[in-house]
Amino acid sequence: TFLEEPQLKNRSAKDLVELLKTTQRYVPAAKKAEIDSALGLIDTTEEDEDWEEEEEDDEDWDDDDWEACDCAHCRGSILGSTSYHPLLEIPDFKHKDMSGIEVVRLPLKALEDFDKAVPFIAPRVSGHSCTLICLHCLNVHTPWDGWEQFFAPSELTGTMRVVLVLAEGVSWHEYPDCALLGAGGSAWIDVLDMDSMDRSDMLLERLVDHEAALLNGHSERIVLMGMSQGGGQSMLRFLRSKIRLGGWIGSVCHVPTAPHTPRSRDPLLVSSRPTVNRSRPVRLLAGESDCVFAPSLVLSDAARLRDVGGFTDVQVEVRKGLAHEGWLPDAPKTKGITRSNSFKDADTALRRAKSFAKAEKACPDLLFLQRHLPIMVDFATPAPETC
């Protein structure tokens, strides 16, 4: 990663690229992901071919276009919005009236003058069981749009609140090493800019405090979640939280700790760091074929979270066939859908099975969330009254 561009075009570099490509054929998927990451940094053979095509595609764009997000939420310039989604049908079971998922969309920038946004995101239904605060990936505000019903586990019979925070410029923080980011990352380090992460974290702390107040101080019913870049940012808030939280769930991301941060800014090394959440569950879904945050990087960070941070309930699931952007074309297929005769309402069972099969392909992180959320929030205990 320290080579100058002219060095990448000499014979030695080309020989190294060929060696790595040959090695890829004979190693497991996790090691192949690491090699893919390295090739993204040193293999220039395809760049020259693609450059002219990219120039043609970019002719009609100006600088403002690259910074703008064209999702419906940004086009509408919202201060905050709320939508309501019914729970998925369960065979032979009838949900309570007004049960469902209240989804809030809130621009991070709105937290700078939060009082103006609060009326737009006030709960429409009282007594929600828990609050899930979710941070999206880099460059995409809408990874979960259309799949909101899958935030709720089958154990939920009342209501839950999901707050989807929207980062300004579709990025939670800056990157000091843009070349590394542009090459798709490295297999062992993700250089983080702690100053910009701190600015986002300060605003997110306001949101967590607000949601805790809505739960009458039952902050243990708040769970933080994030994917990719948003996973690291949400983990930072979890590590720094002075109030007890339900837990943290992330996908294709890693812990914001050394070597990704300077040791002087490592949240696990701060002498006065909070320890209230060290026993709370931490669950991370990693892709075996993820070449952005390779499994070795994720597992190393998880070990540091235990050994240095003192966290006692950390689990990482490395999913076969899963890459950073989703499933590989040749990923193992899920079991086929069969009609079950164990339910009186067989049609509902079949519809549910089909919808879950689609969700597994489109948003495996939400099904991962469904499995682990019940160990973080006690859905059997009546929800506190909402303020």
Image: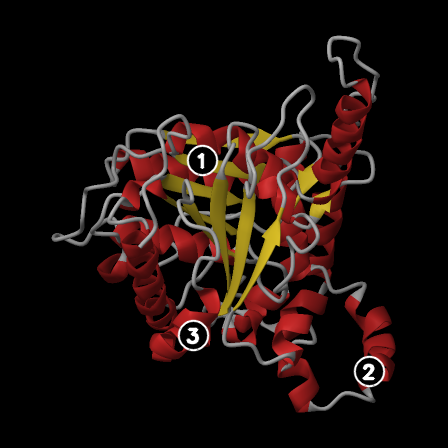
Q: Residue at x 74, y 65 (%)?
A: 44
- Quadrant containing the N terminus is bottom right
Q: Earlier in the sequence, mark 3 or mark 2?
A: 2
Disc number lying in front (3 or 2) = 3
Q: Which residue is mark 2?
A: 55
Q: How far is the residue under mark 3 from the one under mark 1?
A: 31 Å
Q: Is the Cβ of the residue at disc 3 closer than 8 Å to that at disc 1? A: no
Q: Tell me, yes or no, if residue 176 can be seen here.
A: no
**Image quadrant in which you'd find residue 285:** top right
**The residue under label 2 is which amino acid type?**
Glu
As drawn, the residue found furthest toward the left would be 272
Residue 282 image offset from top left, x and y in percent: 39, 36
Q: How far is the residue under mark 2 from the one under mark 1?
A: 42 Å
Q: Is the Cβ of the residue at disc 3 closer than 8 Å to that at disc 2? A: no
Kindly identify which numbered label has been placed on residue 283: 1
**Image quadrant in which you'd find residue 54:** bottom right
Q: Earlier in the sequence, mark 2 or mark 1?
A: 2
Q: Which residue is mark 3?
A: 117
Residue 95 image offset from top left, x and y in percent: 59, 31
Q: How far is the residue under mark 3 from the one under mark 2?
A: 41 Å
**Image quadrant in which you'd find residue 185:** bottom right
Q: Earlier in the sequence, mark 3 or mark 1?
A: 3
